[in-house]
Image: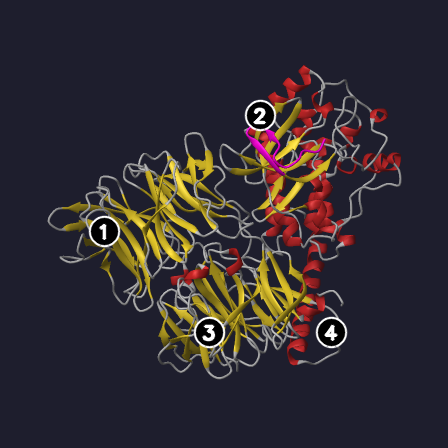
Amino acid sequence: MTLSAGTRLGPYEILSPLGAGGMGEVYRARDTRLERAVAVKVLPSHMAGSPETRQRFEREARTISQLSHAHICALYDVGNQDGIEYLVMELLEGETLSDRLAKGALPLEQTLRYGIEIADALDKAHRQGIVHRDLKPGNVMLTKSGVKLLDFGLAKAMAAPAPQSGLTSLPTMMGTANNLTQEGTILGTFQYMAPEQLEGREADGRTDIFAFGCVLYEMATGKKAFSGASQASLISAIMQNDPPPISSVQPMSPPALDRVVRKCLAKDPEDRWQNAADLGSELEWIGEGSAAGIAAPGAVRRRSRERIAWMLAAILAAGLVGVVILHLRGAGPARRGVTRFSVLPPAGEAFFSSLAVSPDGRSLAFSTGRVGGGSDTSSSLWVYSFESGSSRRLAGTEGARYPFWSPDGKQIAFFAVGKLKKVDVSGSPPQIVTEAGDPRGGTWGADGQIVFSPSAVAGLLRVPAGGGKAVPITKLDGMKQESSHRWPLFLPGGKRFVFLVVSGRPDSRGIFLGTLGSSASRRVLPDVSRAEYSPPGYLLFRRQAALMAQRFDPEREVADGEPLIVAETVQADPAITGLAVFSVSASGVLAYKAGANEPTKYVWLDRTGNEVGAVADSDDMAEPSLSPDGKRIAWHRQDPQVGSDDIWLMDLTRNTSSRFTFNPADDVSPIWSPDGTRLVFSSTRKGNSDLYEKPASGGSEERLLLQEDAAAYADDWSLDGKYILYERADPKSYLDLWVLPLSGDRKPFPYLKTPFNETHGHFSPDGRWVAYVSDEAGQPEIFVQPFPTASGGKWQISKGGGDQPSWRRDGKELFFVSLDRKMMSVTLTSGQTLEPGAPKALFAAPVPNLGVSGDRNHYVVTPDGQRFLLRKVMGEKGPSLVTAVLDWTAGLPAK
């Protein structure tokens, strides 16, 4: 059965086919009620051959639909129309593990990360009495947020009750689409089936663990755990043989991983891991460090092997240092391969999203923060030597981010506390070059000129490296809906440069080529990513989650051929558009932060930090805003196919989401009217970010509320409904707070306009005060001033830094997040003046990107101040490390 585009199955409109197999055909579809994209699987007719089977299937499907987990594909609905049985599932973007394994084994880091995520999903299902029974690489999807298990429990749900089966009831075709779940057959795919399944015995969670061991083995080695030339030989291998040890295929794999897999593949279920939680914990333990990966705790009989492994590791490490030194000094025999190794941050520190390899490829500049807390404002600049393997902190670089080197490699420029600075690598104190309020990267040319982005909503400026007046070199084009020029990088010669253009129009965004002295520019690539140039002629950039290399001739200004994958996953900062975490030198040394961004979701916490609930479908939620009645959330999320943001609404009572805006421009920063009937948001549909208003019911078109020659971002709506407080970008005063009256002449007026950044403004419930963030003290702090004029008193609320102020509905308490990431509370007494109490910590609040450059909302608090909605990282808490690659082009396919 093949469905054409436009076919309706209940409320679901078929858009295009996605794939087909023995379990049915899958289509991309649109849920016309909730206006969301879904996947619809049409089942073969034999799946519902009798009323009893259909009733059982629907009953099981209802149970499976209650599985809510970050790594399980959600089942939304089941239905029947005109005799067509169908399932409605979460639509996933990515590739199956089966497709990925066709390219070979996975790196150890990915094997462990995916394994931990699969084990976590299995544990969740098994605790609810659901067994997958068909776990295999084809049922594991690799997405930007990690793995997603497909068809979870559906094999059991689709199976008609049947007597116990034996080997004689197996299908005659092996490894084909005929391997279906039918009456009288065994559930699952042969090469991943446990012995008890082959014998027709009852399957339980330990059956899934056997299949998981097969998948884990295949990820680590690139080879199947069991194989055979015929059906009989394959069955015999599963029932009697053990696969070769992983270490015999991958000699550098930790012995502890062999132990984990062997226990998964035990023939007797009693000898396997008895639950997926213990299995996942063991994988986490292996991933905690190389020492832990050598041997399992208490393995006395393997102590001698452990010592040998450590000796080999030391020898290999010494050899690696020699390879690095020979490479960097250009000595030794010709290099024929790629050398990869990991760079760890200094003790007690974690890498931030700022890397820069020196021009000669011998050093790496990076910014860090303290483990367990901190923000960009508490970061420092370090230099790591590839030759010595040691890091050195540069004094006076507190708050450093986005470093870039001078052409001779003797100095590093960086941004900190509203300034562009430079520092000698030798260690002399930093010097201020010029002002840069909310920067987005810079580059240092051979002629001593620096080109940089001073703000998230501005064009590029040029300034002499010795200091002076910065002058514009690019201008935002409002007709093309451009909102930012950022991440510039000089090409060889120092005249031309590439930079990222952020725009509300898909045909106007991407990586552009500019030239000093000319206002003309042209698009080279459509990708929304920072780019770097590497000889002999490549542009490196991030596409989806991968680091790509595109052939590029800087003389002819032409990109040729298809891009090549350099690294399958490279991290990016989700809150800073285009900030991919990598750097490359002219000598061919590449450094990048590997791995996908950690999956997240929003959870409800009480005042002590205990989790009391979660919000489904919130992994890509940004700037959440809670309705006055506390029943709905507005937020914005990016459409990965279009690359722009739209506003979405969630009904917390029904746990359902619906799209609110549909323009291809960026729609962000939603705020609710006091009565909850309307929303104001910022949109780039006319060029700059303007303010629009739309009924919360979604029943009519948006209305333009404010259009200026500068970007505007809504912060708050006064409780009396008379004023909207918004942030306005200004090239001279950076980010200021302005007020839009909603009555009278409706003429906006400045509330706070200073040489510093003022952001995140919020009205007090009685309308007498405004809490906001300012960096006038050198770091973001919370202040409160009177309204409607900022005079008559000024109170600093935070001590040691703060961000994201939010009032309790009665105005007697103010919340904010400290720079060491704690939710803080301050009691307030309001009379003729304001009397703030001392800040008190409530609980740890690990929100990202604090400070003036961050999102306007990272959390919301209920009107009574008793519950907080914050983002929680759901992935494994692995070590912070950077992957370094010597002579990276040697790993590319030959022409």
Q: How crowded is mark 4: few (under 14 residues within 10 Å), some or many (20 or more)?
A: some
Instruction: Say whether disc 1 or disc 2 marks the residue closer to the N-terminus.
Output: 2
Residue 578: x percent and y percent? 50, 60
Can you tell which of label 2 and label 3 is closer to the viewer?
3
Instruction: Tell me the magenta residue range.
Output: 1-15
Quarter of the image where the N terminus is located: top right
Quarter of the image with the C terminus is bottom right
Q: How far apart are marks 3 and 1 (CA)?
A: 36 Å
State the residue position of label 2: 63
Q: Earlier in the sequence, mark 3 or mark 1?
A: 3
Closer to the chain start, of discs 2 and 3, is 2
Of the two numbered discs 3 and 4 in the rendering, the one whose residue sits closer to the viewer: 3
Under tag 3, what secondary structure? loop
How is the rendered protein coloured? Answer: secondary structure
- Left or right of residue 893, residue 684 in this image: left
Q: Which amino acid does label 3 sit on?
A: Ser
**Cα distance between the residues tagged 2 and 3:** 61 Å
Amino acid carrying mark 4 in the image: Arg
Residues marked 1 and 4 touching at CB (< 8 Å)? no
| Residue receiving disc 3 | 519
Q: In this view, does 151 lie above or below 261?
A: above
- In the drawing, what numbered circle is on residue 335? 4
**Residue type, numbered disc 2:** Thr
Look at the numbered discs 2 and 3 and tell me whether their residues touch, using CB distance below 8 Å. Answer: no
Residue topped by disc 1: 746
Query: As shown in the figure, which amino acid type bears the numbered disc 1?
Result: Arg
Corner quadrant of residue 660: top left
Which of the 4 image quadrants contains residue 176? Answer: top right
Q: Is residue 122 magenta?
A: no
